[in-house]
Amino acid sequence: MAITTTIFEACSKKRKGSPLISTFNNSSSPPRPPPPPMPLHSGPFRDNIREFLKHCAEIEDYTVCHNPVWCALLLSDSTGVVFPLYVLEENIHSSHPRPLCDRCRCIGWSHHFVSKRRYHLIIPKDDQWNKPLNKESLDKNNHLLHGLIHCNGYGHLLCINGIEANSKFLHGKELMNLWDHLCSILQTREISVEDLSKKAGSMDLRLLHGVAYGRTWFGKWGYNFSRGSFGVTQQKYERAIQILSSLDVSKIIHDFINKRQGELVKRIINIYRDASEIRLVTISDLFQFMLALNSTPLIRRKIALTLAAIPSKSSTHTARQPETCLFKDPNHHSSFSFIAKFDESRWPARRLDDVVRVVLTTLEANGSKMDRQTLRDAVRQHIGDTGLIDFVIKNIDKVVVENQFIHRVVNPVTRKLVISLQDVVHEGNSEKKMESQADIPALEPGLDVNKDLHFLYNYVLLGYPDSHSVTLAIRAILDSKHFAKQWQFKGNNDQDSFLGLVLRFRPSYNELVKELTRPLPPGELLVVPQYATVDELKLMVQCLLRDTYYVMDKFVVKDIQIGKIEEKEYQDGVMCEVEQGVQVWVRGCGLDLDTKLRYQGGADDWTVDCGCGAKDDDGERMVACDLCHVWQHTRCNSIKDNEAALRMFVCCRCMSGRKKY
């Protein structure tokens, strides 16, 4: 309560009377959006953002480059923290030296008309909450949250940081819940994000979460593959995810047998397989389990405490290890005749051996891993002496049977005894023994989940031995940075009073052939009264287009086609029996075809045709051929990122053409 009061007083010192909006909870998954805390317009984003600022925010007493700034106070339901959301309405033409949007160009929206306004939604860092925004605030990437939305409803999530960026109060998941909720109630059309996020400073989340969950971290909120760099298509991306996530952990251990980090890879994998209640078959299963442990402090602490009691590898103990020991040297396997010599054994070796083989068969038939009670019940169907069964299960560990050994371990989470079946690894000839261990990081497996995960990420994923398919799959995922989420227009709850229409611009033949050579932009959303006349509809469409796009600043609507019905077919000019969501085609005149603010991708007609398959700008570094003027990636032409651009660049096609002559 003290924290809430202090922060609230600091944020609201200059904002008396500004409403306080309850925003989100602390769940790891997006909550069901509550009813909007304000009387939002039933229409699209361009109307809803104005309603939001009118009812839920207060205008500041300063401007940024002559652009107005509002502030809304938000309340975190989970922590009770009150914090500001700043909204800056940016007039593109008058305020910005770079009016075109690079994000639109990289995501594939170069053909969108340039909108007149865009809105910056910013939650600054903790120590900046009560300080005014400035010009530099629009370019910073260290805000807790920064989103940019064009007035046509298309936008970009520029950055999101939470506790990972030293925030004392807000977590990244909470901020994503808030952002997703705002986009929903404001009825945005589509939001993109360039996923460059990392875990622990070096692990790319789009690769780590892609392997674990089959999607990026943002995928939990519905962001899906939108565009790949270097010619990566959605099909290639999905195939890469499938290849990596289906890697079998047993095969990974086998493939790393003769590698210098192979023993450590094996130890880490086996520790977490033993700790899991379910069978971890693939690397996807393994990473999901490790990420779940890493996000659960209580479970992580239990594992750490259990493994802290494990003797180090240099220990010279000769006595039999206690029952709760979780790890032994895997090269020291016992034969069951050794167990039969125990003084407390009253059964002959033959009977003990019979029980061991029944245990082996039972484990093989049940996925190679069972807890003690389940295994005991299954073996009892074949062996009647329960005392004999209990003795075997109590003492069996690292017992070799037909090139396999039976291993027993206490699950540190459930505290249940788990018996598993594992393959015996033979060292082989001296020339096949492991290489020097000099460059393997000092690591005690199981004590720090994040360190173990980091090791597997670097040495298994990024360093998989002699696998061309794995290497290509990793490259494809790392080259897929652009993701997007679409929202369906909800329309008005009062279906009898209003109609939600999709407005499409239809240029003339000459405009289409000579001027508007790119694909037509997406349709606009428009909400009109149910029984509006055609003339009223034309006036609303005209006002909408003039208010939204520079190229249509003086556009005059001439005629309208609603669905398949021409304007002249409506009796008395009144729209009747028009369905929700129908497309409205608009023709007119007055397009400003001379403005430089026509397309988000700029007015120049440039051509991209790279050997990787890219046909459009994907945001990666490119160079243009001085002969054919076609743009290609520098990476695809063996030009390193840290190398200066060449004074004279001739592409391979032009070079080969010149050789012919």
Image (cartoon, helix red, strand yellow):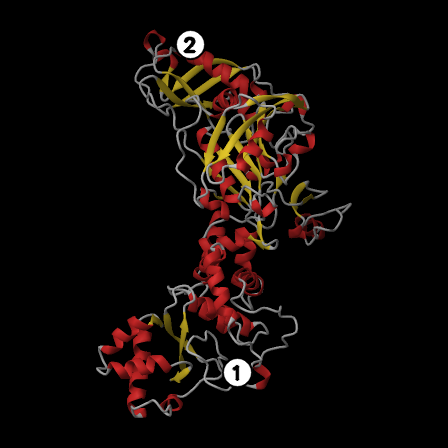
Q: Nearer the viewer, residue 480 or 379?
A: 379
Numbered disc 2: secondary structure: helix
On residue 427, the disc is 1
Kind of residue sitting beneath label 2: Asp
Picture layout, residue 633 above or below residue 444:
above
Q: Nearer the viewer, residue 345 or 254?
A: 345
Circle 2 is placed at which residue position? 535
Q: Is residue 226 visible?
A: no
Residue drawn at (48%, 75%), measured in percent from left and top? 327
Kind of residue sitting beneath label 1: Glu
Along the horizontal axis of the image, is 638 left or right of 612? Answer: right
Q: Residue 466 placed where, x, y %?
A: 56, 68
Along the horizontal axis of the image, is 218 left or right of 421? Answer: right
Residue drawn at (54%, 63%), measured in percent from left and top? 448
On residue 530, the disc is none
Residue at far top of view: 572
Residue drawn at (72%, 42%), measured in percent from left and top? 626
Q: Nearer the viewer, residue 244 or 314?
A: 314
Q: Residue 121 placed where, x, y %?
A: 56, 31
